[in-house]
Image (tube, grey):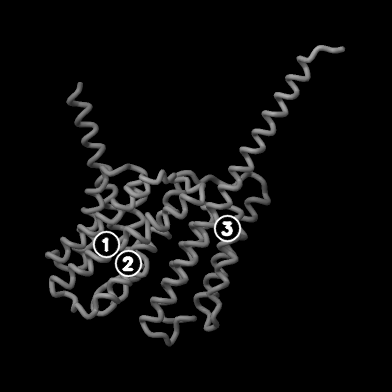
Amino acid sequence: MVRTEEWRRLSTAVLLILAVALAYYVGGRIGLHQSVIVNGAEVTPLWPPTGIALAALLWLGLRTWPGIALGTYLAIERIGDFNLSGLGIVAGNTLAPVCAYLMLRRVGFRSEVDRLRDALALVFLGGLLPMLISATIGTWTLVLSGDLPSARFWPVWSAWWAGDAMGVLVVTPLLLVLRRIRRPGEGGYRVAEVSALVLTSVVVTVVATRSSLSLLFLVFPVIIWAAVRFQLAGSAPCTLLVSVLAISAASDRTGPFDGQGLLAIMINLQALNGAAALTGLLLSAMVTEQNNVRLKIEQVCEDLAELVEHLARGRPER
């Protein structure tokens, strides 16, 4: 009986690791479709596997880290021959989300992201800081293996770090909210508002990213609308839509990205993606926290009213 239970736990752990590896690999294949060549190195403006890896760790714990390593190996193996530089990249891409998970757990991060402190922790301790590890290890590995000249270290490093960080800021919130997302209420107004938000988000983002005019700022009222009315369940998909369509326009060198050099395109693109992700994530967390405080106050007022009514009924008449 004990041995059967052990085999069951082992098989469950193996299946979880393989599932994480498959999700990481699929995310990597999607990210590589939007890759660019920066000084001879292939990097992506948005690397979804980092967001997938961190979400898997937050859901399932450290036992899934082999799946991240395996998924990284599979993604690299599809690009070219696996060698010493590939081993360094696997180490960096595994260590970065693991460190992010440990730091988030240390500060009491809640996956509901229903407090401003959770949003700030996800931005800095989940994305910006730990992704320095993967970018630094990966880029130095390419330099030491001779695949990248040392003079090109900083452009590749910055593009690598930005892509990994954007993967956390854009993909992780979406995956976290998918576990608890619900259909809109049965009221016709709520359904109509969701439909209007979806349609407006698509139209405005396409116009902003494809127009020859500088209209990228138009995406922010839509993100604010989604965050205020639907919190993370609205802002996370909206941010992902903005990021994907902006990357597509930048790859095609059309709209506001037309006629710009690669460096200018990467700066403008990552500034847009970062600002959109921060706006949606922080605003939705603030609104959720305020809503929770209001609900607690209302509950306290109701309890107090019931207590006063109970005391009034029990008071003897004069």
How far apart in space, not on screen, are marks 2 and 1 (Cα)? 7 Å
Give the image location of residue 147, x and y in percent. Answer: 16, 74
Q: Earlier in the sequence, mark 3 or mark 2?
A: 2
Residue 305 lies, in percent from the top left, at 72, 28
Circle 1 residue: 134
Badge 2 vs badge 1, beta-carbon distance below 8 Å: yes
What is the CA distance from the residue labelled 3 to the residue labelled 2? 28 Å
Q: How many marks?
A: 3
Q: Quadrant of residue 171?
A: bottom left
Front of the two marks 3 and 1: 1
Return the residue at label 3.
Answer: 226
At label 2, counting other C-alpha atoms closer than 10 Å, the crowd grade (few under 14, some 14-19, many 20 or more) is: many
Within-10-Å neighbours for mark 1: few <14, some 14–19, many 20+: many
Decide: is 95 above or below 270: above
- In the picture as drawn, the residue positioned furthest to the front comes out as 318
**If you read the primary sequence from the N terminus, does the residue marked by circle 2 or circle 1 appear first?**
1
In the rendered structure, the answer to whether residue 103 lies left or right of residue 88 reads right
Residue named by callout 2: 161
Amino acid marked by disc 2: Trp
